[in-house]
Amino acid sequence: MLDEINSVAKATLGISKIDGIGVFALRDISRGETIHADRIPKIYHIPYGSINKLFPEVRDEILKSWPSIVNGSPFIYPNCRLLSYMNHGSGEDENYDPLTDTALCDIIKGSELREDYTKMANWEKVWPPNKNQWLLATNVEKVKLPMSLSVVNLVKRLIKNFARN
C-alpha cells in the first residue's frame, strides 16, 4: 500500500498563475513517465506509525489534507481527479499528454502541468473557439475573430508601436 502511494503521488493541486487552481509536480518527473493525473481517488488506511515510510513530500501532502490520520482515520488519495484541474497549454507550454497520462518532457518539481485542450476529440463542443480566453491567448492562429474581439491583435499593435520608440 505504501509503495503504491509513493509510486502514484507525482502531482498535487496548487494556486495557478494561469487560472485559479492548477496541477503541479510534487517532485521531478521524467519525460514519458506516467503521472496518474487521471487516477480516481482511493481510500487508504495506514497506521500513523507507518506514515514515515512514505516519501517526505507525499507524507506532507497527505497530512496537510488528512491530519486525522494521527488518530487512525482513513484517507483518500489523491484528493481528487487531478486532470479535472489541469490548465491549458500549447506548444512549449504543453507538458502533459492526457491520452497517455504521461509527461511530454522533463518536468521540474513545483512546475505547473498543462495539457492542450484542443487535442481532445470534440473539444469545440465544450470550449467554443470564439468564447474562450485561454484559446484566444494561446492559440490565436487557430481562431479567426473580428478585429474588435481580438485582444491579442491589440496587444500585438501596442508591442509593435512600443518597439518603434
Image (tube, helix red, strand yellow):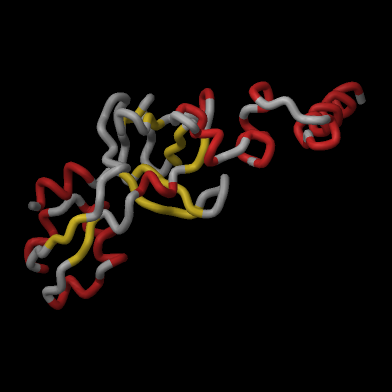
Please state if 155 lies on the left or on the right of 129 as rendered: right
Q: Is residue 101 above or below residue 77?
A: above
Name the residue at 85% across, 27% down. 157
In the picture, residue 10 is in which quadrant?
top left
| Between 132 and 62, the one nearer to me in the picture | 132
Can you say which quadrant of the picture contains the C terminus?
top right
Q: Please tell me in which quadrant of the rendered image residue 160 appears.
A: top right
Q: Is residue 45 above or below residue 153?
A: below
Residue drawn at point x = 43 percent, y = 49 percent? 85
Q: Nearer the viewer, residue 79 or 146?
A: 146
State whether residue 109 is above or below residue 64: above
Position of residue 131 measured from the top left corner of the image (x, y, whole percent): 67, 41
Q: Position of residue 33 (x, y in %)?
A: 26, 29
Residue 47 x/y as whole percent: 7, 67
Looking at the image, residue 38 sits to the left or right of residue 74; the answer is right
Please indicate whether residue 136 sits to the left or right of residue 43 in the image: right
Q: What residue occupies the far right of the structure in this picture?
A: 165
**Lateral position of residue 99 relative to residue 9, left or right:** right
Which residue is painted at 21% across and 75% down in the image? 68
Give the total of numbered labels: 0
Residue pictured at 30% horizontal, 66% vertical: 65
x%, y% of residue 95? 42, 30
